[in-house]
Each structure stands twice: as structure tokens, then as C-alpha cells.
Image: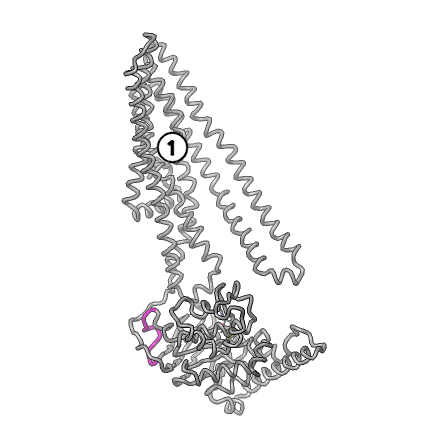
Amino acid sequence: MPSTAPRTSNDILARGLRVLGAGIREQKAIFAVAVAGGALFGGMTVASAFVLGGVTTRTILPAFAAGRTTAGALAGAALAILGVALVKVVGIVGRRVGAGTMQYRLQASYRRRITRQYLTLPLSWHQRHPTGTLLSNANADVESTWYPIAPLPFACGAVVMLGITVVALVRTDPALSVVGLVVFPAVFTLNFVYSRRMSPRMTHAQQLRAEVSGVAHESFDGALVVKTLGREQEETDRFRRQAVELRDAMVRVGRLRGTFDPMMEALPTFGTLAVLLVGTMRLRSGAATVGDLVSVAYLFTVLALPVRAIGWVLGDLPRAVVGWDRVQRVLRASGGQAYGDRVLPARSEPARLSVDQVTFGYAEGAPPVLIGVGFDVAPGSTVAVVGPTGSGKSTLVTLLVRLVDPQSGSVLLDGADLRELSRGGVSDHTAIVSQATFLFDDTVRGNVTLGADMSDEQVWRALAVAQADRFVRALPDGLATRVGERGTSLSGGQRQRIALARALARRPRLLVLDDATSSVDPAVEAAILRGLRSADLHATVVVVAYRRSTIALADEVVFLERGRVLGRGSHQDLLATTPGYARLVLAYEEAEQERRRNRAALAAGGRGRAGKPPAKAAAKAGEPDGGADADGAAEGAA
Ligand code: ADP
Ligand code: MG
């Protein structure tokens, strides 16, 4: 570690050194190798200067004096220079291999730790952290944390070298050493000033670079919106503003570098000139020899680079501290879910689900989203959760599969609190399908199996229950058809059915559908629910539903409003006893009919507008977005 670092009171410097210390502690052995290499290099660099001085004294000067020399003397001189150079090479190799290995090992290790942490952190944490941040934490931040590791052994070697040099200079000639004692600190100070002034500019530029790519990313992602609403010019302007800012920032970086670089190159050169000047005077007075002068002058020319390595380390420290802090924020994030050690026996029959007095809020102090919610679902039965938008339905279903934990109350699967189950114990028995389906840029088969070992027959069975087998069979390559990025080559309803098949293929004992068939035609949706009961993939089902036809298929309905259960029972009972429920279902019904009328008008070539907004009543009641597929309707009817 550069012990010459000045002003330990400097916060960034102290914290930066602590970061380096943490890295060194993790990679002690390889760091030792790298530093040994660096020290060897430093020592040999100084040695090479004195070998050159010695060769001058013993071989070159006598040769000039005698007017001739011997092959043996020349060979001896060459061997001495070569020998030192070879040892130096060993040092360089050790240092570079060591530093590289250390840097990449640390990066790999921290990337792994971060991604592992992402996997353990609960959904609630992920909801607060955008994808872009997760990516930069795992990549750019880890990289910048270990940036100064690469030049660190070099810098350590430079410190060793400076120490030897100063001692050697004083012993050679005190007068010459004065030049060194002026020039080295000057190079060092200049470096330090440079690093301090450079790093905020660099950090700023780094930030801007992330922003530029963020803007580009968003524009490409929203290409459809940009194009359809004619926002190309605005997007271009937005991008230009960011790009110009980045350009200016980089120009400022370049200006600073342009000013400092020549100074940094010039200082040791002036040092050499000063050595020659002082040296010739000392020669004349007989206080120094030509050999001494050659050694010292050479030293000055080779010392400049290693001394700059110290500057590289110092210059990268602020970035390392910022990166380290961001990485630690993830690694120290609490809210990781604790797991018990209970394992539910592997069974194929449907699970029993109990929700007991569950209260949940997204943030501390914020009003709870679910208040004392409780209901039981008998094995193999279907419960529909019905409620207006924002009543807490999606929140409730995430609790059922333990994506989040309740603040009070509990969710029990076959009588076991989800929190007592071992890691992976919940997902072994449950599956959730949400409205926002995500398909990978893979084949239909790959999207259903997600890499699990399944036979084609199993895949087809799941597709059949999800009412997706017919359209998959009609695809050009059947199961092997690629669906494109996010499944763009499929319709919304088709994507939803493949996502459903994905859940079914895992043979969950509890299947949770959060508005997962909203883009599927009602007839197909009903066929799916009926199929779930008769198929061998029989599961206990909790379904967030809107359509009367779907709700009517449920054994029981849980009516949720503002986070409370306002009614439970059969659809008919609730219609009679709970006015809010009746109003809501009626509003959905009207919206559904309106949509059907529109589609009929469209099919008849009438004036029905595509993408007509949903009926007013439904908008108020909270109609889910997205119309059903026409293809689904055709299949359902078939
Ligand atoms: P529903 O699915 O019934 O429409 P949600 O469960 O999605 O309702 O939302 C219930 C309430 O919780 C809403 O008021 C919503 O604003 C809030 N909410 C949902 N998700 C989050 C979140 N990630 N962070 C904070 N509040 C949320
Ligand atoms: Mg919802």
C-alpha cells in the first residue's frame, strides 16, 4: 500500500485505502506475488541505472582512454545489463499477472455475491430498485471498486523504488540527491493534484455516460409509443441534450489531461537536465565520477512512469469508494427472507391454503394495503378474488406464494407457515401467473420448461390445459418455434396461455392466477378453468377474476375492498348480500358486453373503432386493460 499517501485526514483517501485493504485481505497470496513482482521491478530498475554507471566506469571510460577494448570486457558489460533486465522481466510478469488475477478474481467474486444477493432479496426490495440500477451495481460498480487494484502493485513497487533511489542518491553524491529530493516530491505532488482534479470530472462523465445510455434504452424500448405519437423529434432532442452534456464533460477531461500530461512528462526531463548541470560542476570539482552521473541521469528518465502509477491508484480511489458504497448497499440490504427447515412431502394432490388474519403494507408507516385478510381454500377447490382496482388483489396473491411476507398474520400451506418452509420449498408446490407475462427469446418449449427436464408429452399436456396446444401446433415449427424477444411474435392472449402452461408444467399443487387470462377470450378462459378441474394437473386454484363467467366457475368468491374482505361465499350469495359486489360485477359485465358489441361491429366491417376505450362504468370499477383475442374466441368456439 502506498505508505507515502499524504494527509490521511482526507476522508476519501482513508476510505479508499480501506477498500484496497479489504481487497488485499481477500486475496492475500496473489497480492503478495504481485507486490513482490512490483518490488523486484522497482529494485531492478534502480539496479539497471547503477549497472549502467558501473559499465561506464569500468568498460566505456577505460576504452575511451586506451582507444581500444576487449571482446571479454564488452561481453561482461552486456551480460551485466542483460542479467538485470531478465530479473526485471520476471518482476514485470509477476506483477502484471498477479495484479490482473487479483483484480478479476475480486470482480468475479463480488459480481457473484451481488447476484446471489439479488436472488435472496425479497420482491419488495426489487420493487424499489429499477433494473438499470441492479445491472450497474453488478457490473459498473463492481468494476470501479476494483479499478485501483490493477496499478496498486506497480505503485507499491514504485514506493520501494523511490526509497532505494533516495538512499542510493545520498550515498552516491549528496549534491545530486538534492535534485532528486526536489524533483520526486514535485512529480508526486503534481500527480496528486492531477488525480484530485480529475476524479470528480471522471465521475461526472461516468454518470453522464450512464444517463445517455439510459435515455437511448428508454427510447428504443418505447419505440412504439415514440413512433405512433410522433415523438421522434422530442426523443432526438432529449438524446442530443444528454449527448452534448457528455461530450462537454469529456472535453473538460481532455483539457485537464492535455495540461497535466506534458507537465508530468517534462518534470523528470527537467530533472535530468538539472542532474547534468549540477553533475558537470561536481565532475569538474572531482566530487563525482562520470559513472555516478550516468547512473543518476538514467534513473531520472526511468523513474517517471512508476511514480505516475502512484497517481493512478490515488486517482481511481474516489471512484472505488463510490463503487464500494453502492456495492455494499446491496450486500448489506436487509429484508432478505429467512427460511425454515420444514419440507412439505412431495405429493400430487392439491394443497390446502389458509390465509390467517394477514396484514401487509408496502412501507413502514404507510397505511396497510391488506388488513386482517383471512380465508381458507379447501384442497382442489377454486377461489375467485374479486375487487376493484387497488383493493389489494395483486398484493394478496404475492403473499400466497411468499414473494413477500405479511407484517402480521400468516399464510399456511397444508398447515405449514410459509416462513417455516425451506428455501425453494414454496415454489416446489406453488406457481403464480401474473397479468404481465414475460416470455424469453426462446422456443415455445424452452419457455414452458425453462430448462427443466420435461418430456414433449408433459409440455403438450400443460399446453392443452392452458388451451394453447391448438395454436402451438399451427405454428411453423410447433414446439420449436422461436417466439422472439419477449414473445413479440405471439398475441397477448397466446403469450398468457404459454405463461400459464409454464406454471402448469411444474405441476403446482397451488396455482395462483393474477388476472392471468385477461387477454384471453372469456369462453377460452372458462375452458381453461374447467380444464384445470378435470385434468391430471389438478390443483387448488386462487384466481383474481373480473368476468362473471369466470367468477361463476369458482367454488367460493372472496370480495376484497380497500384491503379488507367485505364478503365471502358463492357468487349467488354475494350478489344477494353484498351490494358493492353486485355493483362491481355488473359493471364488469357491461364492459364485457360493450367490448363484444364493438368486436362484432368490427367483424361486420362496421364503424367500431379499434382500441376504443372501455365503457365508463368499467373504467370506474377498474376494468383490466387489454382486449381479448379474436383467435381465442375462434378456438373457444371450435
Ligand atoms: P389490485 O391488484 O387489487 O389492483 P394492488 O395489490 O396492485 O391492487 O395494489 C393495492 C395497493 O397497493 C394500491 O394502493 C397500490 O398503489 C399499492 N401498491 C401496489 N404495489 C405497490 C408497491 N410495489 N409499492 C407500494 N405500493 C404498492
Ligand atoms: Mg392487480
Q: Is residue 334 above or below residue 305?
A: below
Q: Quadrant of the N terminus?
A: top left
* Residue 346, percent from left and from top: 32, 77
Write the residue at 37% across / 81% down: 351
Q: Residue furthest top?
A: 66
Is residue 539 visible to the viewer in this orientation of the structure?
A: no
Q: Is residue 599 above or below residue 186?
A: below
Q: Amino acid at mark 1?
A: Pro
Residue 48 vs residue 277, the one in the foreground: 48
In this picture, residue 542 sits left or right of residue 252? left
Write the residue at 35% across / 74% down: 418
* Residue 104, percent from left and from top: 37, 47
Residue 227 vs residue 207, the one in the foreground: 227
Scheme of image coloration: one colour
**Residue 535: quadrant of the picture:** bottom left
* Residue 243, percent from left and from top: 58, 48
Q: Quadrant of the C terminus?
A: bottom right
Extent of the magenta region: 414-423
* Residue 463, percent from left and from top: 47, 76
In this picture, residue 245 sits left or right of residue 394? right
Per the image, label 1 sits on a secondary structure element best described as: helix
Q: Is residue 455 magenta?
A: no
Q: Residue furthest front?
A: 477
Write the residue at 38% across / 79% down: 509
Residue on which disc 1 sits = 306
In this picture, residue 237 sits left or right of residue 330? right
Q: Is residue 420 magenta?
A: yes
**Residue 502: quadrant of the picture:** bottom left
